[in-house]
Image: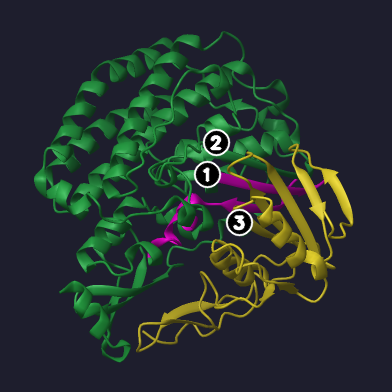
Chain colours: A green, B yellow
Amino acid sequence: MMQDQKSKSNPDEWVELNMGPQHPSTHGVLRLKLKLDGEIVKDVEPIIGYLHRNAEKICELDYYCDAMMYFDRMDYVAAMNMEVGYLEAAEKLLGIPPPERAQWIRVVMAELSRIAAHLVWAGAYGLDLGMLTPFFYCFVEREKILDIFVEVSGSRQQVNYMSIGGVYQDFNDKIIAKIEAFLDQFPGKLEDIYKAFINNDIFISRTKGIGILEPEVAIDYGVTGPMLRASGIPYDIRKEEPYLVYDKINFDIPISHKKDNLARFIVRFEEMRQSVKIVKQAIKQIPEGPYFNPKSKKSLMIRLRGEGEYYARTESPKGEFGVYLVGDGGVKPYRIHVRSPSFKNLSVLPVLARDTMVADMVAISGTIDLVFGEVDR
Amino acid sequence: MLVEIIEETKGKDGRRILKVAKENLIELMTELKKQGFNHLSLITGVDRKDKLEVVYHLHNFESKKYIVVKTETLDERVPSVSGLWSSANWDEREQYDMMGIVFEGHPNLKRMFLPENWVGHPLRKNYDLKKVQYINMDEEGNDYATFDPGDGW
């Protein structure tokens, strides 16, 4: 029946439909131009740029230390990971390495931020598929992480916690106790959330076997992160090109060979469990010592000069986050280019959504984990 | 490798950089893809004032090798590699939008973020930030740019 319909369909009779940019299932301001044959999607053209601020240009107009606050606003649900990404490039270019204590602190914060980002995704994905309850469970847990962020930086989302050569504030016993209290109760809660999804028949039928992404296609389109790992390729920058102190920490990269929506869901949940494992190890190993490099005092910060170019890759919750930094010997960056993983992952949507139902396309675009601050920059 | 390479250096980040003339770019890229560089990680344009530099980052999933290819252009034109890697499609559109690099042979060279009639390319060093442009929507739902703040709704 389906085959029959396909062969009969005439491109002239396809209906053009505009979806977004203010559509609740597009996670922000994604606009899709759909070509429909009945309810079957024949062609998708994503149109982006509605949240475009040209952060790359704004960064060029400011000092090296000021550029970081624009990175907070790229992937705004995982600001810590963005800061780690920028500082990996900036510190190497300027020649101001962070002390060991700061590196461990950064690992703790980046992994907590990864958990928070995945929780936002899981909750929002539930909403895409019509599940309201898990959303609240996810956000309750996320709020506990944001409380920790408030404790260290004073801000919930746009934390601006790290700085060139270290971190803004040292860990004290209160913060460590808070993180440990979170780690004690979180794994149990995570299993509850997981069960709320996985025991739901509707959720399984909406995700299983839908949105198959072949590994060759994924590589060809530059897809990275959980999406690539759910297609069976164990590619994670934390293992591939370890930054900070990830090479001293024992953790696994979860992969799945099922390639569908459900695989991406399972991979992200397994990643949260691995992040808990990382934070548990890291919090015990934070060494004593200074938490910032003396060369990066506030008064000296605006005089930092960088020359040459540096490309740093880090693993953000969405995938491979790269920062290409060029300096011309001045106090301001000459050029910053950001390789944003969501941008690359979105480009594969037309392939994934071809010949699926409109409702399935929403389920597929949900698994990409789009954050428009980062796609549009 | 048979392709003529101008210069081979090692970057600050320890990555191999190949500098190539833009006439030989496609030949080199085809050769690299044959060697297994199946992941084009990013395309960047750098405005060096007198010339535009285009940087390609390639990655090989099997051998875990990483390579950087650089080329320069004086007339804003560079051959497109979107026939070799699908990910180049959006990357090149982005660089065209922001840097004004025209990728010859690209199947759909439209602006990625900004409206089609936007004046100038923002990441160029000679872009005038003082000239404010406003974005509006026409009857069809498509965006357009205008210098007139009172235009539209």
Q: Amino acid at mark 1?
A: Glu
Give the Cα separation between the discs numbered 3 and 1.
Answer: 18 Å
Q: How far across and how far down the image is residue A224, in percent?
A: 48, 47
Say what secondary structure mark 2 lies in.
helix
Magenta highlight range: A321-349
Task: Report the chain holding disc 2.
Answer: A
Q: Residues within 10 Å of mark 1 (few under 14, many from 20)?
A: many
Q: Is residue A55 left or right of residue A131?
A: right
Q: Which residue is mark 1?
A: A320
Are dots 3 and 1 in contact, CB under 8 Å?
A: no
Dot label at residue A237: 2
- Earlier residue among tags 2 and 1: 2
User: A362 above or below A45?
Assistant: above
The residue at the point 12 percent across, 37 percent down is: A199
Badge 2 vs badge 3, beta-carbon distance below 8 Å: no
Q: In the rendered structure, which amino acid carries the disc numbered 2?
A: Ile
Give the mark nearest the N terminus, 3 or 1.
3
A335 drawn magenta: yes
Tell me: B47 left or right of B145.
Answer: right
Residue matched to label 3? A56
- What amino acid is at disc 3? Glu
- Mark 3, secondary structure of its residue: helix
Membership of A368 in magenta stretch: no
Q: Is the residue under label 1 in contact with that under label 2 (CB below 8 Å)?
A: yes
